[in-house]
Amino acid sequence: MKNLSFSELHKCIKSTRPMGNRFVLKPDVEGIRLDIFLSEKLSIARSKTKTMIEMGYVKVWGKTTKPSLKVKKDMIIEGEVPSQPSILVEPQEIPLHILYEDEYLLFINKPSGMVVHPSFGHKNGTLVNALIAYLDKNHIRMNTQEIRPGIVHRLDKDTTGVILVAKNSDAQETLSRMFKERKIKKIYRAIVWGNLDQKEGKIEGKIGRHPKDRKRMTVLKEGGRDALTEYTTISKMIGFTYVEIYPYTGRTHQIRVHFSHIGHPIVGDTVYGKRAKNLAERPLLHALKLEFVHPYTGKFISVFAPEPTDMRSFIEAHSGKKK
């Protein structure tokens, strides 16, 4: 693998522009985001490098990654600048269950099975496809050429419940910052395997990529990122516990990883569930509520999505019957 100098890189880009621009880089700095690093080195907009990374055009050590990854000097970064790096996402008329809406914010009750934003294998039928159609229909101005217009946080494909969307670029930046600064309280509910001993509890453990399976996350003794999850027991069933959960950080798969780590995986979780994975058609995890001070009106706002039918049915079915 050839490590191109930046002057060689730009010559390569100019000479290969019609076919897409390949590059191989070894950083000379550390600690900055990957999308910012590529934006500076390739002299293209950060929004485009972010899109390139999200759509899989960029790999680090041969694997796809996230725009927020911090670069290190020993990294090998390779990829391609596509001839049309701004990916256009097709609007699709998909029904949205809107919980609350004002001039700045849109709260949606996301159903199970809906992916939030397009990626390889999920280019259609996503929340973003539906959102673009909704924005166009209601004449709301947003940069719909971005892969994540309005998206300020994520829910896993099969997680149901409240997801917050910004209705303009300024609101998107503001809300993203509020999530990062933990000014938005997230409340979830889930059904977990086994009976929890404590009425209330706290789970701490650094979360990072599994050393043997890079598609999974895990709690690591060394490395990873700090993660904190608190919970309250709502009720106990025969062999299961219904819990309310308060994640204070927003790591990938945090709730699922943390409860699996303490031996009480989410019922129906095929990735982290072990014995509980075949007991439901999806992980029984629901984003119940978001609460925060509205950044534009200054008023406290709390938006709630009732538990879905499959969770209520599971509770009813296991509350008084022996397994």
Image: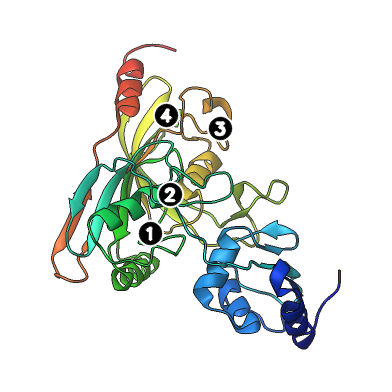
Secondary structure at badge 4 equals loop
Q: Is residue 182 left or right of residue 22?
A: left
Q: What is the image's colouring?
A: rainbow
Q: Foreground residue, 231 or 45? A: 45
Q: Verify CB contact (< 8 Å) between mark 2 and mark 3.
A: no
- Between discs 4 and 2, the one toward the N terminus: 2
| Residue contact at pointers 2 and 1, CB within 8 angstroms | yes
The reply to whether callout 4 and callout 3 are in contact (CB within 8 Å) is: no
- Closer to the chain start, of discs 3 and 1, is 1
| Residue where numbered disc 2 is placed | 116
Which is more N-terminal, label 3 or label 4? 4
Residue lying at the far front in this picture: please name it: 18
CA distance for labels 3 and 1:
26 Å
Report if residue 185 is visible in the image: no
Amino acid carrying label 4: it is Asn
N-term-proximal mark, 2 vs 3: 2
